[in-house]
Amino acid sequence: MILNKAFRLAAVSTAVLASSVMAESHQHEAHVHGIAELNFVIEGNVAEMELRSPLMNIAGFEHEAVSAEDKQKIKSATKQLKDAYARVKFPDDALCIVDDAKVTIGVEEDEYAHHDHAVHHDKHHGHKDDHHKHDDHHDHKHEDHHGHDKHHDHADHHDHEKHHDHGEETHRNITAHYHFHCVNPAKINAVTLDFFSHFPHMETVKVNVLNRVDIRSVELTPKQRVIEL
């Protein structure tokens, strides 16, 4: 993919500026609703863009679509996002034609939730070891053993709830990739992105730009949708 290759080359040839762009490009763990990130590369006659956003910004929710209504929302949002000519507008005289447009939805696990789950897993096994030791202790009273079972059941129930919560902390992202072929790339002096009209939950798009001139970052909002090149 040209986009990835271009950013890697930029990181090597322009260490200070490119590294800051790439660092910002890979800070996905924040997963802030209302904010999306877009990498934009122009190389030769090719213009390539990749938008990464929390699913909430596009569909209005992040849980798994189970109901017919939610599935329809996902289908409609995906169709709108995949419409490259509507989302990305180049100058007419640049003669940019869409070669490909793809949209994918992925799951991003919360790192802290995963850590908590691992801790719980270790604690659970440690508890099982304690239980075996308890069985080996023949002088322990039956009443205490019964109480231990109650405690064990309560712990299992509590751990199950924690495990359930862990699943609910999972984030979902949506990625849109646009690939254009431009007959006159030198005519691309500005590009207008129209995500805000159709996706009201989208508040900010952080754009990393790499073209024949420089590398820089710009921030787009509903009132500022144009990338000046």
Image: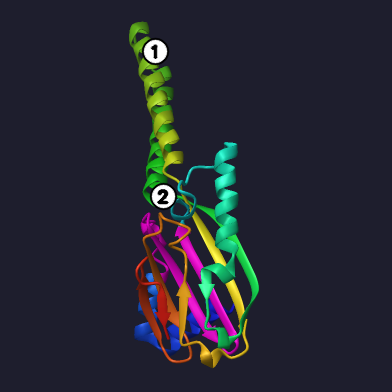
User: Is residue 65 something one can see in this rendering?
Assistant: no
Is 137 drawn above or below residue 20 in the view shown? above
Indicate the amino acid at tag 2: Asp
Query: Viewed as shown, does residue 97 lie left or right of 77?
Result: right
Q: Indicate the position of residue 197 as horizontal and vertical percent values.
A: 45, 61
Numbered label attached to residue 138: 1
Whether residue 50 is in magenta: the answer is yes
Q: Indicate the position of residue 151 as horizontal and vertical percent values.
A: 35, 18
Which residue is found at the position 36% from the left and 58% from the top? Answer: 30
Which residue is found at the position 38% from the left and 54% from the top? Answer: 33
Is 72 drawn above or below residue 16 in the view shown? above
Indicate the amino acid at tag 1: His
Instruction: Residue under label 2, please give it.
Output: 110
SS for dot 1: loop
Decide: marks 1, 2 in contact (CB < 8 A)? no
Q: Nearer the viewer, residue 116 or 94?
A: 94
Q: Indicate the position of residue 58 as horizontal and vertical percent values.
A: 48, 55
Numbered label attached to residue 202: none
Which residue is found at the position 44% from the left and 92% from the top? Answer: 213
